[in-house]
C-alpha cells in the first residue's frame, strides 16, 4: 500500500437525501466504488473507517413532505429506513450509517457554526431574497426553478444547474418561479450569514493546486469555479426555513443552517456516534484532526463544489480539522440511453432490484463496476446486465471454479492433491496468480475500479485457459501425478480468486471460501500458496445462475410502462365527432383563466379523483378532478392549467369543487393538461 505517511483512512460516501429510495445511479456514483475501496483497505489490514448517513434537512425533504401531506420527520424516517436496509442487503459495508436529524449531529453542526461565528469568519448581510407572496415565505434555493444563464436549461435550481453543473445564485436565474405556488417570486429584505468565499479564494486555490493528482474531471471543475468570470462569491450559510439545525446566534430566529453547511458536518457527527457506540468517545478526533489520517470523499460530480471548495473552506476556517486528500468523484450513469429521473420513475431502484433478483447482489455489483462512469457518463442496460452475468460471471468465473472443484472431487475425493514437478505452463499460471493482485491493488489505489475488476476477471480467464490447455480429464488414468499438479495449481488460483474477488463480489467470495473450506485470508497472503495438499474441500455448488430472457423482458417492460406513463400516446382511432353548434354569446359566458396547481392529493376511497388547490390569480380554490389515473399528485405541484372559474360549485365525494380544469382526451381515454405556450400570470383570461 502507498501513502505511507498515513496511519489511518477516513472514507466518506455522500449523504443521500432522505426524500426517496436509492437507485443504480447513486450506487455507481459513489457507494459501490467507496465500498470496493474500503473492503480492499480492510483486506490489507489498514485502519479505515467508512462513514455515511441520511441527509435529512434541506428543501428536497420539505418539498416531499408538502407533496405527500406529511411532516418532514415522517419523510426522513421512512426513507432513512428504506435506504439503510437496502445498503445493508446490497453489501455496502459502512461502519456507521447515521442521520443528520440525530441529537449528536444537531450539537456538532451547531457548535461548528458557532466556532466560525465567534472567530468572525462570517459576514452578516441584509440582502434581497426571493419571497413567495402566495405561500407567505422566503424561498430557499431549491424552491426556485428557472432558466440557467449558462446553458438555458429551464429546469435549473436556485443553487445549481444539474445539466451543466454551474454553481448559481437564485437571482442568476432567468424567468424564476416558485416550486411552492408556481408564481413569480418577489425580492424582499432578509438577514443571513455568509461564508466569504471570495476572500478565501487564495487559500482554496492553493489547496486545489496541491492536488493536481486528482481525477481530471474534479481538478478541472474546481479550477473552473475558481478562475472563470468573477471567481467565487460569498455564499449564505443560513436559510429562512423552519426545518433543519437552528442557527445558534441571537437575531437568527426562524433560520436554519444551509443544508450544504450542515450535511458534510454529518460525516463528523456520524464518526462521533461511532466512537461513542464503540466505547471510545474521544477517538473521533483521530479520524478528523490527526495529520496522519487520510480523508477521502466518494461523491457524484454534482457534489464536487461542496466537497472540494465549500467544505474545505469551512474546515480551514475552523482550524482544527484535516482537509480531504482526495475526492474521486464519478460522472453520471444513464439508464437505457436516457438520464435517470426520479420524478419520471426512470430508474432501477435498489430495493426493487433486491426483491426481483434474490441473492444476486454481486451480479449488479459486477455490472455496475464494469460500467462505472469514472471519467465520463456511462450507460446501464438490462441486456448488458444479462450478458455480464451469463457470458462473464457464469461462463468465465463460475465455470472455472466449478470445473476445478468438480474434478478435485472426481479424481481425488475432494482433497487438495500434492503437486509433482511444475512444468512451464504451471509456473506461468502461478506467476499470473502472484502478479494479478499487484495489478488489482495498483488500479484500486488509483481509483480505477473498472480496470481492477478486469484484472480480476483476467485471472479467471487465465484459469480457464490453463485447464483447456492442460486437459486433465484426458490424462487421468495415464498420468495421475500430472493431473494432481494441474488441479493443485487450479485450486491455488481458485483460492486466490476467493481473496481477490472480495472487494468486488463479497457474496460470491464468501461462497468460494465456504466451498474451499477455507478461512478468510488477507490480501498480503496472495503471494503464498493458500491451500495445503491434503486439505478437504466441500462439494461445489453453482456460484451464478443463468438469467433468462423472460426476467430481462419483465424489467424492460417495467421501464416502458414508466415511459408510457410520462407521455401521451398518439391517437390510433378516429377522433370523437363534433358536437352540435353553440352561440358566441354562450361561449362568452364561460370565464376561463390560467392557474397553477399548488396542492394535490388523492380523494380517499376513489381511484380516479384528485383534490387540487389551484391559484387562479383571483383566489385559491378547491377543484376535484378525475385525473388520478394519469398523474401522481406529487408530480403536478406547480403545473400550469386552464380553469373554468365561473362553473357553478358542486359537491363531489363530500368536497365542494369550485371549477373545472381543461384537459385533452384522446381516443384511448388518456388525459393531458391544456396549457398556454408562454408562462402567463395566473388569472390571465383564455378566450
Image: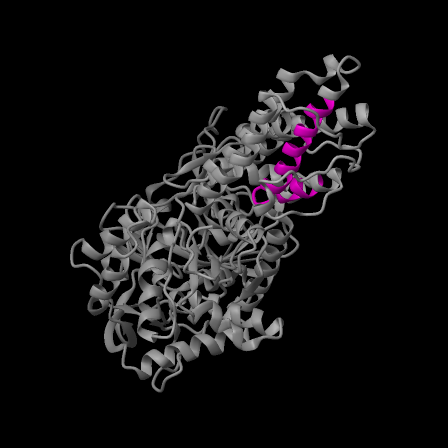
x, y (%) of residue 592?
36, 51
Q: Where is residue 180 in the image (x, y as percent from the top left)?
A: 40, 61
Stretch of the chain drawn in magenta? 483-511
- Place of residue 162 in the rendered image (x, y in percent of width and height, measured from the top left): 35, 49
Of all residues, the one furthest to the left in this rendering is: 229
The reply to whether residue 625 is in sight is no
Q: Main secondary structure of the magenta part?
A: helix
**Is the residue 442 above or below the residue 166 in the image?**
above
Rendered position, 413 above or below 374: above
**Quarter-of-image position of residue 179:** bottom left
The residue at 35%/53% (across/down) is 593
* Residue 273 visible somewhere in the drawing: yes
Determine whether 316 is above or below 157 in the image.
below
Q: How many labels does the image show?
A: 0
Position of 418 with respect to 25 (left or right) is: right
Q: Is residue 504 magenta?
A: yes
Residue at 55 percent across and 36 percent down: it is 434
Amino acid at each position: 500500500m502507498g501513502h505511507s505517511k498515513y496511519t489511518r483512512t477516513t472514507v466518506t460516501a455522500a449523504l443521500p437525501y432522505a426524500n426517496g429510495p436509492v437507485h443504480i445511479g447513486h450506487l455507481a456514483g459513489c457507494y459501490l466504488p467507496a465500498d470496493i475501496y474500503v473492503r480492499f483497505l480492510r483486506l490489507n489490514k489498514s485502519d479505515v473507517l467508512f462513514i455515511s448517513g441520511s441527509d435529512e434537512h434541506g428543501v428536497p425533504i420539505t418539498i416531499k413532505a408538502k407533496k405527500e401531506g406529511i411532516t418532514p420527520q415522517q419523510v426522513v424516517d421512512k426513507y432513512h429506513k428504506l435506504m439503510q436496509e437496502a445498503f445493508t442487503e446490497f453489501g455496502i459495508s459502512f461502519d456507521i450509517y447515521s442521520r443528520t436529524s440525530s441529537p449528536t449531529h444537531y450539537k456538532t453542526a451547531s457548535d461548528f457554526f458557532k466556532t466560525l461565528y465567534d472567530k468572525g469568519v462570517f459576514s452578516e448581510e441584509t440582502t434581497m431574497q426571493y419571497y413567495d407572496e402566495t405561500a407567505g415565505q422566503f424561498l430557499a434555493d431549491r424552491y426556485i426553478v428557472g432558466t440557467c444563464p449558462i446553458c438555458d436549461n429551464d429546469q435549473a435550481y436556485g443553487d445549481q444547474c444539474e445539466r451543466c453543473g454551474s454553481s448559481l445564485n437564485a437571482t442568476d436565474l432567468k424567468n424564476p418561479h416558485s416550486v411552492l405556488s408556481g408564481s413569480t417570486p418577489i425580492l424582499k429584505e432578509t438577514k443571513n450569514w455568509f461564508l466569504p468565499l471570495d476572500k478565501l479564494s487564495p487559500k482554496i486555490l492553493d489547496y486545489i493546486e496541491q492536488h493536481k493528482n486528482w481525477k481530471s474531471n474534479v481538478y478541472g471543475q474546481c479550477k473552473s469555479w475558481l478562475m472563470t468570470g468573477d471567481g467565487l462569491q460569498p455564499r449564505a450559510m443560513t436559510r429562512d426555513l423552519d426545518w433543519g439545525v437552528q442557527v445558534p446566534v441571537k437575531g437568527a430566529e426562524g433560520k436554519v443552517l444551509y443544508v450544504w453547511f450542515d450535511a458534510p458536518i454529518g460525516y463528523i457527527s456520524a464518526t462521533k456516534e461511532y466512537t461513542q457506540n464503540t466505547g471510545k468517545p474521544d477517538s473521533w478526533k483521530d479520524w478528523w484532526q490527526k495529520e496522519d489520517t487520510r480523508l477521502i470523499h466518494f461523491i457524484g460530480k454534482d457534489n464536487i463544489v461542496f466537497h472540494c471548495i465549500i467544505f474545505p473552506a469551512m474546515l480551514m476556517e475552523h482550524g482544527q480539522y484535516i482537509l480531504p486528500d482526495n475526492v474521486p468523484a464519478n460522472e453520471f450513469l444513464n439508464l437505457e440511453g436516457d438520464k435517470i429521473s426520479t420524478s419520471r420513475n426512470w430508474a432501477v431502484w435498489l430495493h426493487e432490484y433486491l426483491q426481483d433478483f434474490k441473492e444476486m447482489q454481486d451480479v449488479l455489483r459486477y455490472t455496475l463496476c464494469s460500467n462505472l462512469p469514472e471519467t465520463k457518463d456511462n450507460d446501464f442496460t438490462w441486456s448488458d446486465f444479462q450478458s455480464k452475468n451469463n457470458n462473464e460471471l457464469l461462463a468465465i468465473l463460475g465455470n472455472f471454479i466449478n470445473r476445478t472443484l468438480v474434478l478435485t472431487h472426481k479424481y481425488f475425493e475432494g482433497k487438495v492433491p500434492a503437486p509433482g514437478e511444475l512444468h512451464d505452463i504451471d509456473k506461468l499460471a502461478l506467476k499470473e496468480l502472484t502478479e494479478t493482485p499487484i495489478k488489482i491493488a495498483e488500479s484500486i489505489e488509483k481509483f480505477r475500479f473498472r480496470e481492477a475488476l478486469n484484472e480480476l476477471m483476467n485471472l479467471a480467464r487465465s484459469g480457464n485457459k490453463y485447464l483447456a490447455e492442460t486437459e486433465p480429464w484426458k490424462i487421468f488414468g495415464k498420468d495421475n501425478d500430472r493431473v494432481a499438479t494441474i488441479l493443485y495449481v487450479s485450486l491455488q488460483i481458485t483460492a486466490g480468486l476467493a481473496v481477490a474477488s472480495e472487494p468486488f463480489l463479497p457474496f460470491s467470495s464468501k461462497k468460494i471460501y465456504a466451498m474451499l473450506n477455507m478461512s478468510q485470508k488477507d490480501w498480503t497472503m496472495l503471494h503464498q500458496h493458500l491451500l495445503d495438499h491434503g486439505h478437504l474441500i466441500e462439494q461445489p455448488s453453482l456460484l451464478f445462475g443463468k438469467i433468462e430472457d423472460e426476467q430481462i423482458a419483465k424489467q424492460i417492460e417495467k421501464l416502458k410502462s414508466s415511459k408510457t406513463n410520462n407521455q401521451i400516446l398518439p391517437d390510433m382511432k378516429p377522433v370523437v365527432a363534433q358536437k352540435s353548434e353553440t352561440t358566441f354569446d354562450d361561449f362568452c359566458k364561460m370565464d376561463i383563466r390560467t392557474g397553477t396547481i399548488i396542492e394535490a392529493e388523492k380523494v380517499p376511497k376513489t381511484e380516479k379523483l384528485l383534490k387540487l388547490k389551484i391559484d387562479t390569480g383571483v383566489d385559491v380554490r378547491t377543484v376535484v378532478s378525475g385525473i388520478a389515473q394519469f398523474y401522481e399528485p406529487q408530480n403536478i405541484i406547480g403545473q400550469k392549467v386552464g380553469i373554468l372559474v365561473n362553473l357553478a360549485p358542486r359537491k363531489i365525494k363530500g368536497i365542494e369543487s369550485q371549477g373545472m380544469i381543461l384537459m385533452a382526451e384522446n381516443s384511448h381515454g388518456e388525459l393531458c393538461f391544456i396549457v398556454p405556450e408562454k408562462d402567463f400570470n395566473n388569472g390571465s383570461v383564455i378566450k
